[in-house]
Image (cartoon, rainbow, N blue to C red):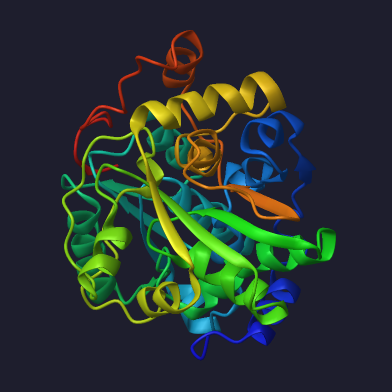
Amino acid sequence: MQAIAQRSLYRARRAIEGVVRRTPLVASPALGRVAGGDVRLKLENLQLTGAFKARGAASALSALDERARATGVIAVSTGNHGRAVATVAGRLGVPATVCVSGRVPRHKIEALRATGCELVVVGDSQDEAEAHARELMERRGLTLVHPFDDPAVIAGQGTLGLEVLEEAPEVRCAVVPLSGGGLIAGVAVALKAADPAVRVIGVSMERGPAMARSLRAGRPVATPEEATLADSLQGGIGERNRYTFDLVRELVDEVVLVSEAAIARAMRFAFEHDRQVLEGAGAVGIAALLEGAIRPPEGATVVVCSGGNVGADAFLRVLADAEAVDPVPIGSAPGTGPA
């Protein structure tokens, strides 16, 4: 918690006010009956650009000096972070470039194009896209808005935790999607500062869970990406990770992995019982509860539904048969190169 203090979350909230939305926290009686407890959903799928990433992007962009705003920013993304950066940058009049890999689903590519940013589709992994982004950053003098390993981004994501505390001060457990760790680190800082006994549980997919493997190894390790419904959770944490690895190791109580079939069932469950459209990454917490991998403690359990940016075709396949759905295919984005 030393790297990110709770007061930085309050500063971030003041900075992003009027840019991001305060999202609903709603009870899910159906999920509570299955899991056995008081379960509530934090609906970040209703956030600006359809995912929690708007919080961190707005926090980081608000901290830029005039030179950086004039020169522009660059982001590397599996879709949601880049869309958030490009959207917020557009509102602030800041030029934005976004680099993504060829694994990013087509609907996320099209959503990025619609922001008007300079879009570069390059490589076959998040790590390759990041390497290209860093080359452009050095060549053009751009400012990198990191998707997770940045104090301003972590503080922005942590504003979600502040909202949970204000609406459900009785929270005893938070179930949070886990990828690079920016979201869960920020949420954990908020909740643990209020009450160290609150359990914070990270959930990722079984296919290529970079943070989970790094925690097991005791250090950041390279993790090959695999096709998954939870495509927003793909990508490594960086072998030179400065903040999120240590924060997750210090503050997160448990990490759970869920299968592709469990993610699909959770997406269908959220739609049928709570009328929420969630992408795979946004449904992993629900999946863990449905599978019995997490048992809610006494008191309120908050499940963060981190995003709803799922393509229509993929979502309809899940609704048609949540037991036999293929993950997002590799290379589903249109060709490579500048766009």
How far across and down, in percent of the image, does residue 200 sit? 56, 64
Q: Residue 138's image quarter? A: bottom left
**Is any atom of residue 240 visible in this view?**
yes
> For the C terminus, which image quadrant?
top left
Viewer-nearest residue: 325 or 90: 325
Q: Residue at x 75, y 75 (%)?
A: 14
Viewer-nearest residue: 75 or 313: 313
Report how many numbered discs are placed on residues in the image: 0
295 versus 185 height, above or below: above
Q: Residue 36's image quarter? A: top right
How far across and down, in percent of the image, does residue 13 sit? 72, 72
Q: Residue at x 31, y 39 (%)?
A: 104
**Is any atom of residue 93 visible in this view?**
no
Left or right relative to 216: residue 281: right
Left or right relative to 126: residue 195: right
Viewer-nearest residue: 215 or 307: 215
How far across and down, in percent of the image, does residue 73 sit? 42, 67
How far across and down, in percent of the image, does residue 288 sit? 49, 41
11 versus 272 height, above or below: below
- Residue at the farthest top position: 320
Q: Residue at x 66, y 33 (%)?
A: 31
